[in-house]
Amino acid sequence: MELQHSKILVTGGAGFLGSFVVENLLARGVPRESISIPRQNEYDLRKWENCQKVVEGQELVIHLAANVGGIGYNREHPGALFYDNIMMGTQMMEASRQAGVKKFVAVGTVCAYPKFTPVPFKEDDLWIGYPEETNAPYGLAKKMLLVQAQGYRTEYGFDAIYLLPVNLYGPRDNFDPKSSHVIPALIRKVSEAKKEHKPFIEVWGTGSASREFLYVEDAAEAIVLAAEKFDGPEPVNVGAGMEITIKDLIETICKVMNYEGEIHWDSSKPDGQPRRMLDVSRAETFFSFRAKTSFEEGLQKTIEWYAQQGTH
């Protein structure tokens, strides 16, 4: 797809990942006036008529708008997470099809994978079991976009593709302790402990669970490459192909931030999915994507950005 000459809609384009996707498009020479970013306060995408309005005249839709958060947020809001995400996604894709949009990029989530998926997660294992309970409502709502995309391709010849990004992190992430994901939550926790001279920090779970993290600028690059070069029915993992335990993660953050206090584990709190790491070979084969940012470098940039915000 010729991105430079296309009218592009990026839902969630003012958000964490979306803002980097928009910057990536601009860097590739897409004119600013060719990119539309519907704002949440103006267009509630859970409402059908708003979906119809925003897709009018668009050629490419990159759907990133989502209600999303960490484990605590998922446990408190399973109903809203299911409803909001399934309504936005399903209606955006249908409105795009009706409006004659040329291509739809559905951005799913690693939470769509079954709880006990063999590591590394391969796209062919998406349906071998039920997702991890704490994030199943969110994961399943996003997973339905894959079913819809494949169904629309078969019945209508509609070019919808489906990507499965792993946990993202980076500058501009959400650092609100009520809804943030693990990396921003831990950075904030360490930052506050340093400021208040606390001798220890408390972390959820046992530290044994593992995660894979992808730097947000790399994720944006993958999405734009897929929009440009990929038009198959297969779901595609988007990740860095690395794995780190939560214990090693917090120790690394403490080291980078020069915090020498102890780490106390609250094992009454959930670990979430036991292990997470993606097989990322399909993305490289289909649209030549490979993550460029090392974890240490990405972490350093994220910590520096947070420090500059003066939020602590």
Image (cartoon, rainbow, N blue to C red):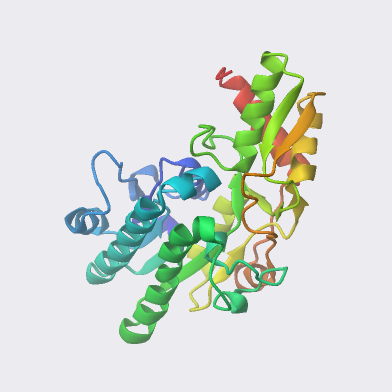
Residue 55 placed where, x, y %? 26, 58
* Left or right: 242 as drawn, with respect to 273: right
* Left or right: 190 as drawn, with respect to 85: right
Residue 165, picture quadrant: bottom right
Query: How many numbered discs?
Result: 0
User: Relative to residue 83, is residue 131 depicted above or below?
Assistant: below
- The foreground one among 111 and 17 is 111
Q: Is residue 99 shown to the viewer in this render?
A: yes
Residue 120 placed where, x, y %? 72, 68
Residue located farthest toward the top when viewing the structure as drawn? 196
Residue 154, picture quadrant: bottom left
- The foreground one among 192 and 78 is 78
Q: Which residue is painted at 64% across and 40% down in the image?
A: 183
Q: Which residue is painted at 69% across and 26% down in the image?
A: 190
Q: Quadrant of the N terminus?
A: bottom left
Residue 71 placed where, x, y %? 54, 47
User: Relative to residue 190, is residue 152 depicted above or below?
Assistant: below
Q: Which residue is painted at 57% across and 43% down in the image?
A: 181
- The foreground one among 65 and 265 is 265
Q: Which residue is painted at 37% across and 81% down in the image?
A: 151
* Left or right: 4 as drawn, with respect to 185: left
Residue 63 placed where, x, y %? 40, 57
Residue 295, picture quadrant: top right
Residue located farthest toward the front when viewing the structure as drawn? 268
Q: Is residue 70 shown to the viewer in this render?
A: no
Residue located farthest toward the left when viewing the structure as drawn? 49
Q: Quadrant of the C terminus?
A: top right
